Amino acid sequence: MSVQHPKFRAAAIQAAPVFLDLDGSIDKAIGLIREAAQNGAKLIAFPETWLPGYPWFAWLDSPAWGMQFIQRYHDNSLSYGTPSAARIAKAAKDNAIHVVMGLSEKSGGSLYMGQWIIDADGNTVAVRRKLKPTHVERTIFGEGDGSDLAVHDTALGRLGALCCWEHLQPLSKYAMYAQNEQVHVASWPSFSLYRGAAYALGPELNNAASQLYAAEGQCFVLAPCANVSAEMVEMLCTDDVKRQLLKAGGGFSRIYAPDGSPMAEPIPENQEGILYADIDLGMISLAKAAADPAGHYSRPDATRLMLNRTPGERVINFTLPGAVVEEAGSGALEQAALVGVRESARAAKKQPAKA
């Protein structure tokens, strides 16, 4: 009996959020989810930290200047398990569509650059964090760990996601390829920063990274990329220097096939919209026949990747009976701590977040 490969329509967002307004951005996201579903999409992908917007202020002036936005950014970042998160999960369920949402995740007192994968029933498939925030992003966000390099089984195939310059991390990419990733979401913020002064931040190089990911991994790549709105420029660019550093526009969303070919007509960078492409996972076999870098095209005798999937728990809880504590030396206590680490790793850091 022949294998039946899933076929479905996928959507990549090119739009600005309602900047620093979580509820307003969720309202807009729900509208975009509804629109994509009405146009037949079964998967929709959002840009990096789309909720509540990418923190451009970190790139425009000193950390002291940017502190004026920090409390508002924290207050409008998304915490899982809240009514705000429930609204997004409900939109996925109501519209029978898988959602990959880019967000600033608030957990305790820290922020993380997150991607939330939700299935068409509104259930959490996975939550992940960017392993290493890039450059000045590290003044705002914490880090993920090896458990965030994961590919997940869904009704649409093997689905994974990375943020922005994670696509310039060769070993992280290889870890994803090796998990038989079929559909990949490459979430980008906007390509409107330092235009003409920093080629590495522009659309040519970064879209090439998404395109190469498709060709290297022989997978479909949805690469949503946000716009910088005129309202964002007005709020953040308070002098001529800042207005030179950050421009309105910057939307360069793309969708690529497993051979690297573009699958959707681009939207002008200053316009908002949704890109669509019809996905046939059967195409992957044709690309894999030529080169599968984690399979027949690999040379494990020469190079191999070691992936540490241990969750990066900050606190390991364990309990010893009082009598044991009194009699035990430091070695026994250290051994108990190691047991706690192993148990924590087995439980996994991020249980599916119930919205």
Image (spheres, rainbow, N blue to C red):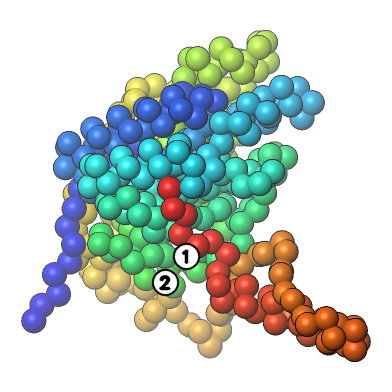
Question: Residue 146 or 22: which is nearer the viewer?
Answer: 22
Residue 343 x, y percent position in the rendering: 62, 78
Tags 2 and 1 touching, CB below 8 Å: yes
Kindly report the distance in space between the C-alpha atoms of the residues bearing marks 2 and 1.
8 Å
Residue 2 on image: x %, y %: 10, 77
Q: Is residue 258 visible?
A: yes
Circle count: 2
- Residue at the (42%, 65%) spot, across then down: 151
Checking the image for residue 150, the label placed there is 1
The foreground one among 17 and 338 is: 338
List x then y, in percent, for residue 196. 57, 27
Mark 2: amino acid: Gln
> Do we see residue 97 in this rendering?
no
- In this rendering, position of residue 295 left or right of residue 93: right
Observer-nearest residue: 209 or 226?
226
Which numbered circle lies on residue 341?
none
Q: Seen in the image, is 105 located left or right of residue 92? A: right
Question: Which type of secondary structure does the marked residue at label 2 adopt?
Answer: loop
Q: In this view, does 169 lie to the left or right of 160?
A: right
Query: Which residue in the protein does label 2 denote?
Result: 179
Image coordinates of residue 233 in percent, x first then y, are 55, 16
Residue at point 18%, 53% (across, down):
8
Left of 283 or right of it: where is 141?
right
